[in-house]
Image (cartoon, rainbow, N blue to C red):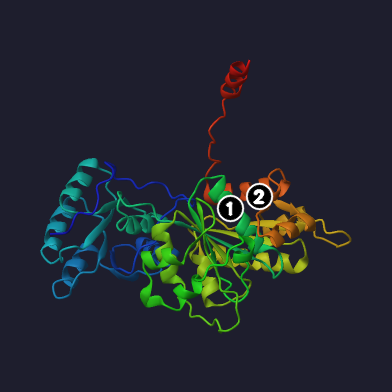
Amino acid sequence: MISYARNDADSTTSPSPRAEDHIAPAPRVSVQAFCETMETATAVQAAGEDRRLAKAHLKIQMGGMTAAVEAYRSAPTPNVIILETEEHGDILAALDHLATVCDAGTRVIVIGRVNDVTLYRELVKRGVSDYLMAPAAPIDIVRSVCGLFSAPEAKAVGRIIAIAGAKGGVGASTIAHNVAWAIARDLALDSVVADLDLAFGTAGLDFNQDPPQGIADAVFSPDRIDTAFVDRLLSKCTDHLSLLAAPATLDRVYDFGTEAFDSTLDTLRATMPCIVLDIPHQWSGWTRRALIAADDILIVATPDLANLRNTKNLFDLLKVARPNDRPPLYCLNQVGVPKRPEINGGEFAKAIESQPVVSIPFDPHMFGSAANNGQMIAEIAPNHRATEMFLQIAQRLTGRGEAKKPRKSFLPPFIEKLRAR
């Protein structure tokens, strides 16, 4: 019999697509779809190209339930079967027939055109995992498949935030570290900073940490990676913030394959609610993969022509590669350098077709002092404009408001004064 996966609603309609939804990526599973219309086949194909199904092996065939029954008479069934049907009365009979050739543990998603709660309940009784109303959008299919492997009682999968510079020297690492600090301190969200610039990373310096181990140990030992191993590599900065530092040495050459960081990031997802990636300014298979696979992205740029071109190129690439995600965000940094010609913020936004989250003013004394002292801006200047801007970025990237701090009562000091008298 087809295995039951979940029964989370008495409704035959799928929730409307929302780009801001946090959908946990699916593991390495096999998915086969049997469609009756080209419209659904196109939607399933588009879903298979979504970053959250990047590890899934998808195969699409036409013919609906009849083709599925014939296919599995002599072949093992995959982890997930997606079935489209245009019939009403024959759905239940066809599913009963499919159950006779279906392997135990296979999960089934049905796409149909009948909006009927009674039918949905009958499908659930037969072990159908989900029912989507046609026409199904790609994001609905992504949400349905990924939801099969996210147990309701399991801890929420961590959110990955990638921060990258449009050009070298724009201060992307500084902003990444300060934003992570704001997420951990002001939003009270357990976070980790992963410094992916193994040769020249500055996270250890910025947080005044010198851990003996870091992200290089994970990348060069893929067979050893598990939750306990990664936990040993983390360096604790505050109660809510940890660091996965880069060695920042040149005794090795850091040439990586496209999937070099996958296992490390997957493990971090399972243990940390928020992972901030400090991505170096380089273009390789793994940096591109890290950007596209992130849940949210921030591009850091300064107001000049090269940054404008690079930011536009990144936006165009990411919008095509991530059609079901919200667009990346960007901020302008080092705004107002004396005697330096700059592109006006309005012109920059017009070219990108998006407003910057914030425009951080040029303040070499404040940022230089923080860097040399191994501190965050919020530590040395809590009321500085940049501190508030880092909190704004953190809120936009995470979708969370500032954590409420306990209100201090005026009564204790007042009572102490009375006692003194």
**Would you say 89 lies left or right of 213 here?**
left
Return the residue at label 1. 181
Local crowd size for mark 2, using a 10 Å CA cut-off: few (<14), some (14–19), many (≥20):
few
Q: Residue furthest right?
A: 339
Tell me where residue 170 appears, x and y as whole percent: 71, 65
Return the residue at label 2. 379
Specify the amino acid type for callout 1. Answer: Trp
Tell me where residue 140 appears, x and y as whole percent: 38, 54
Q: Quadrant of the N terminus?
A: bottom left
Q: Nearer the viewer, residue 78 or 335?
A: 335
Tell me where residue 64 appears, x and y as whole percent: 24, 63
Q: Is residue 214 above or below residue 406?
A: below
Instruction: Identify the residue shown where x is 29% and y is 63%.
Output: 36
Give the SS element for disc 2.
Answer: helix
Instruction: Identify the residue shown where x is 15% and y is 64%.
Output: 104
Give the SS element for disc 1.
Answer: helix
Q: Nearer the viewer, residue 401 or 349?
A: 401
Local crowd size for mark 1, using a 10 Å CA cut-off: few (<14), some (14–19), many (≥20):
many
